[in-house]
Image (spheres, rainbow, N blue to C red):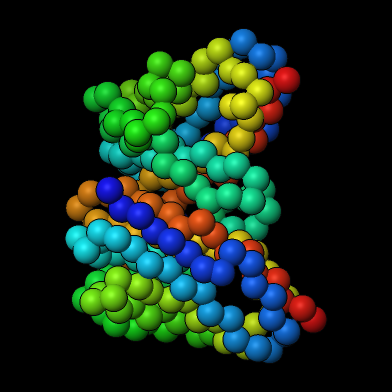
């Protein structure tokens, strides 16, 4: 079945530094990928939609200059958290269309970001 | 935009009993409704989905019902087992639009 690989799975960084998270579709091409953020015991909040070869579409309230998204190929999308602060600590997870279900969306394994 | 509400936020049932989780959505154009199961620190896993042209769908112990008029849909788990314990999320989407909007989640605990 479809697999979405996400790296790193866990990262700790210092406040003020930037962190890049990669999301790869391993056995299918994903023209569109989605980035979500999930705080403990809360739901997945859509941050942005990443389209291959074009600019990402950000949800209201999400700072595009802080959360840089690049989707340079059909199999790779990256999310860079710039100048990270402790309040950016969260679980970040990507998804791409492809996989089980009628219109299968496969999730990456998620990245636990802790900013200290 | 779409607004998805989910209830209850927590649910405890005895092993073997049934569990029901309900969601409502606001955008009448939404036409695809998946349900995901998420274990702690792991990715959500699709467990069942339904399109708006279907009122009910069943897969073994799991079923989903949809009421388009009322804009609500429900997940039913029968004969619950301890391994069903997890957080369950509903979602709504316009298939053409691709984006999923998730409910707030239900933490299900099945007591042995």
Q: Quadrant of the C terminus of chain B?
A: bottom right
User: Could one spot residue A110 in this view of the protein?
Assistant: no
> On the picture, is B54 further left or further right than A113?
left
The answer to whether residue B82 shows anywhere in this view is: yes
Quarter where residue A40 is shown: top right
Q: Which residue occupies 53% across, 51% down?
A: A43
How many numbered discs? 0
In x, y percent, where is residue B74?
Answer: 43, 76
User: Would residue B4 be found to the left or right of residue A14 on screen?
Assistant: left
Residue A17 image position (x, y, % from top left): 61, 11
Q: Is residue A64 left or right of residue A116?
A: left
Location of residue B13 in the rendering, given as x and y in whole percent from the top left corner? 69, 81
**Residue shown at 29% from the left, 31% from the top:** A57
Work out which residue is located at the far right of the displayed protein and give it. Answer: B112
Residue located 53% across and 27% down the image: A21
Q: Position of residue B19 (x, y in %)?
A: 58, 81
> Can you say whether B103 is above or below A67 in the image?
below
On screen, residue A105 versus residue A92, left or right, reads left
Residue in the picture at 66% in, 23% down = A86
Q: Is residue A5 above or below residue B6?
A: above
Does B55 sit above or below residue B109?
A: below
Please say if B27 is above or below B52.
above
Viewer-nearest residue: B46 or A13: A13
């Amino acid at each position: 079945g479809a697999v979405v690989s996400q790296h790193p799975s866990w990262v700790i960084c210092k406040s003020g530094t930037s962190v890049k998270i990669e999301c790869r579709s391993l056995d299918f091409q994903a023209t569109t990928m989605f980035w979500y953020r999930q705080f403990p015991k809360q739901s997945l909040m859509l941050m942005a939609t990443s389209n291959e070869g074009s600019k990402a579409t950000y949800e209201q309230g999400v700072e595009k200059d802080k959360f840089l998204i690049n989707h340079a190929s059909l199999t790779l999308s990256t999310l860079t958290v710039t100048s990270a602060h402790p309040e950016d600590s969260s679980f970040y997870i990507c998804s791409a269309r492809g996989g089980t279900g009628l219109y299968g969306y496969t999730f990456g394994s998620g990245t636990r970001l802790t900013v200290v | 935009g779409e607004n998805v509400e989910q209830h209850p936020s927590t649910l405890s049932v005895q092993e073997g009993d049934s569990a029901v989780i309900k969601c409502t959505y606001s955008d009448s154009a939404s036409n695809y409704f998946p349900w995901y199961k998420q274990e702690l620190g792991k990715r959500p896993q699709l467990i069942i989905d339904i399109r708006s042209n279907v009122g009910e769908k069943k897969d073994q112990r799991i079923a989903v019902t949809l009421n388009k008029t009322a804009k609500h849909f429900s997940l039913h788990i029968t004969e619950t087992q301890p391994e069903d314990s997890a957080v369950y999320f509903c979602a709504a989407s316009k298939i053409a639009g691709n984006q999923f909007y998730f409910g707030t989640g239900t933490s299900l605990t099945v007591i042995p």
